Image: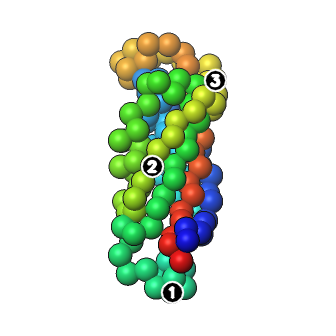
Amino acid sequence: MLKRLVVEIGTGVDQHGQDPTRAAVKGVRDAMSRVCLVGLKEVFGLEDLDLMRVEIVVATPDPGRVRPEEVAGAVPFGEKTVRVVKGGMTAKGIKVPELGDDSEDILVANAALTVMVEV
């Protein structure tokens, strides 16, 4: 039976370049930065971290432009799934073409990571 061990939320921002994948990856890394999964080994006895499952949900203003394989690559272990939905936000910043901007938009992505193990 698959059981959830942790759900963590993160936020990622791409200030220049308007790349929702970059914002999503930052959101996933932000979520991971607050989790230490000692219970995987100490409670569940999981020796192979690739046996855990990680569901990644990313909300961004332009979900069709997100590259899910890059988002999944931000999580170093486990069997990963990525679902991208409309959400996040944009805020007005400054357009600096030398930094890859095509608009003044700052993209914000939210990420939810759910770590599950078989028990």
Between marks 1 and 3, how big is the CA–CA gap? Answer: 43 Å
The crowding category of the residue bearing disc 2, from other C-alpha atoms within 10 Å (few below 14, some 14 to 19, many at least 20), is: some
Which residue type does callout 2 highlight? Thr
Q: Residue 60 placed where, x, y %?
A: 56, 31
Which residue type does callout 1 highlight? Glu
Point 53% across, 23% down: residue? 62
Point 42% across, 54% down: residue? 80
Reading the image, the residue beneath label 1 is: 42
Q: Which mark is residue 91?
A: 3
Tell me the quadrant of the picture where the N terminus can be found: bottom right
Secondary-structure class at tag 1: helix
Which of pointers 3 and 2 lies earlier in the amino acid sequence? 2
Report the number of discs. Answer: 3
The crowding category of the residue bearing disc 1, from other C-alpha atoms within 10 Å (few below 14, some 14 to 19, many at least 20), is: few
Which residue type does callout 3 highlight? Ala
Q: Nearer the viewer, mark 1 or mark 2?
A: 2
Q: Is residue 99 above or below residue 103?
A: below
Point 54% across, 63% down: residue? 115
Secondary-structure class at tag 2: strand
**In this orientation, which residue lies closer to the viewer: 100 or 12?**
12
Q: Residue 68 placed where, x, y %?
A: 40, 38
Reading the image, the residue beneath label 2 is: 81
**In this orientation, which residue lies closer to the viewer: 34 or 39?**
39
Q: Nearer the viewer, mark 3 or mark 2?
A: 2
